[in-house]
Image: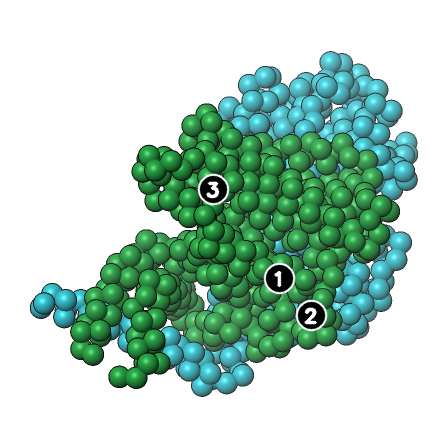
Amino acid sequence: MDKPEKASVRFLTSESAGSLIAAVITIIIGLLLGLLILLIIAPTIALPAFRMLLTGGFGKIGVLSGIGRVLYYAVPLIMCGLAVGFTLKTGVFNIGVAGQYVMGLFAGLYVGISCAGIFGSFTWLAAIIAGAAAGGAWGFIQGVLQAFFNLNAIICGIMMNYTGLFLVSMIVENSKGVYVRGRGWTEIVPDAAVIPRAGLNNLFGNSTAANLSIFICIALCIFAWFILKKTTLGYRMKAVGLNAGAARYAGISVRKSILVGMLLAGAFAGLGGAMNHLGASGTRYAITDALPSQGFAGISVALIASSNPLGIIISGIFIAFLEVGGVGMQSFGLDPDLVDVITSVIIYFCAFSFVFKYLYFKLAARLRRSE
Amino acid sequence: MKRTRILVLLLALVLCMSMAACGGGSSTGGGSGDTPAASGAGDAGGGSDGAQIACVFGAGHAEGINDKAFIQDCWEGIKEFGDANGKTYAYYQPIDDSKQSFLDAYDTAIKNGAEVVLTVGNEPSDSLVDATRDNPDVKFISIEATGFEESAMPNHYSILMNATDAGWLAGVAAVREGYKSLGILPCVAIPPVDMWTWGYVQGANYAANKYGIEGITLQHHYLNNWSASPEIQATAASWYNSGVEVIQCNTAGGNTSIIAASDAAGAAVFGSDKDQFDEGETVVTSEVVFRKPIVISSLESAYDGSFPGGTFWLPGVEADAAGLAMDRTRFKNYTKDMYDEDYADLKNDVGGIRSSMITIYDIPEVDDMWNAVSPKYIEFINIE
């Protein structure tokens, strides 16, 4: 056996390869069940419709513009997924992402709409920083409630979601120059506050909405991975996530880990909200009593990627890909909810990913022995 | 050792099966080439690949196409027209309610063969400017989008149902029926929704004045939600508890939650959009605007060459496109004859009822439309 083969065997028997294989298996099972459902409800069109879903509808809308579209819709999913996954590593289930997302998008829109005169062509940058700050602050408050008052993370998160949502509604309705009275939504985002396309329109066509924010997303995922993997802070956070009692005994501050985790997660979610509303040609925020779905989609994204920040990039793009295909699938008269069904099935099977991992490692062990 | 072997075998089987099935799925799809339309026609709700008529509506409508309210009404019109004229149809719900999502949904629809795009609701308003400009060969019909009263592209026919008329008739009916405590629960503060409210308030005011009825109170609250939810039901229930006798509900898919609250309280409720008599035991009547015939006639014009592109239409009682569902009602005092009399008065503008009515176009500098209307023009009922 020469060296490169040994390296490949080492990779195949590694922890991350196991996670990857398990994720792929769960995704395939999810897709197969989706196909099964399609076959039951609409046997004659099941295969072409499923093909549309699997190809993201690229056959009709064009591969390049399809990719551009997927990258646009992936941005909030990746950021919310990162907000969930990052805290999961520290042992906190951040279900308050939707609230942090709303706070972030509001701050982003507010700065973007009302401060265009101050920041000029860098308004978009100021706006997304404001979004990250607002989301971070909201996450931090939740962190304080959990770390110092020992509140249940789930209840705390859900309540903070609604508090954030209604707070934003209240502030928006009373913001002159930002809110359009009688229309129930915010003003149009000025051009200076729209995130630049960064040349992606030349690549994917002018109708594409893909913009700089996808690069920011990927950079932040790498940043989060670096923190968790390569820094003392990340080591401490993971230790708290694995066993808070043992970590405390070893002299690690559990409170600090939770606070830092929630602060960063909130900033990620807030940035996701701001980037989603300031991307493309800008999106108005309409007053609503319903929480944004992206906050919860983030949970799926994180679970599929086993909370690995680098995996979250892929799972976010994957879910966005299914969503784009789901829109195309409607040309067959099928409900786009099927995409939700498939994602849900994948998540259910994520619970089995340990079984798949276990089986895979058994196989890998045999592989090694047979060498 | 034996068990391990079985496990490994099982894993291999799962992997192989999934790979094979997955490959099979896509290769079969690939085998049928680029003509999946042939196999798809006529299935799954009448839609098919390559649908010629596309219905696009907001992602926020969780009930989807069967919202038992205005989207379903329009969709039924599309289906009727499509089936009668051999046109294929499908609906597209964008990923979210952003302008970009709508543009992407139109693009998907058009590239999948749409010749006519019919949008429903106010959400697409922003996107229609770009969409009509970028797709000059596609005909756009918008139902309830706003901002196109003055000008629209030549391939865009903008229709806003005059719900003020239907609301007015409901307001008159509520007062003449004998209700003293009225409630209004609209979804959001947008013109197509506010129109119902203003009509209702002015109708109640008119009837209170005309018949000398005193002591009528009226409450109003925006729900900021247009899908069925426990929150809406709780709000409506608390209103009934506090003595509200009848609620005019105007919240699309959320109507069913208000109707449920009314049924539970044994109170009364006015449905909206389409006849909701069968949705509950206490639905007294429904304020309706007849979108279905309007949708059908606009689709006919799109195909027979008489497409009134670039124009705006506000159909109301003059086109017999608005009114109350009076075929089946649970009124105790208000009769069909009384309704016919009120309807004729409104249609013929007796005493300038209709021409003097406050509509969304009468308040040029829009502040808070609701506040602008209520205290200034309403003298005979108490707004709480």
Is B383 placed left or right of B88 in the picture? right
What is the crowding at mark 1: few (fewer than 14 residues within 10 Å), some, or many (at least 20)? Answer: many
Q: Position of residue B351 (x, y in %)?
A: 90, 31
Q: In this view, does A279 lie above or below B281?
A: below
The residue that mark 1 highlights is A214
- Amino acid at circle 3: Asn
Residue drawn at point x = 67 percent, y = 73 percent:
A204
Q: From this viewpoint, which residue is outermost toward the left?
A: B2
Chain-order first, disc 1 or disc 2: 2
Q: What element carries label 3?
A: loop
Distance, label 1 to label 2, CA atoms, is 10 Å
Q: Position of residue A221 (x, y in %)?
A: 53, 57
Distance, label 3 to label 1, CA atoms, is 23 Å
What is the crowding at mark 3: few (fewer than 14 residues within 10 Å), some, or many (at least 20)? Answer: many
Q: Which chain carries label 2?
A: A
The residue that mark 3 highlights is A94
Q: Where is residue B367 in the image (x, y as percent from the top left)?
A: 84, 34
Q: From this viewpoint, which residue is outermost toward the top?
A: B215
Quarter containing the N terminus of chain B: bottom left
Chain-order first, disc 3 or disc 2: 3
- Amino acid at circle 2: Leu
Distance, label 3 to label 2, CA atoms, is 33 Å
Quarter containing the C terminus of chain B: top right
Residue A200, numbered label:
2
Q: Which chain is green?
A: A
Q: Colour of chain B?
A: cyan
Q: Mark 1 lies on which chain?
A: A
Pointer 1 and pointer 2: residues touching (CB < 8 Å)? yes
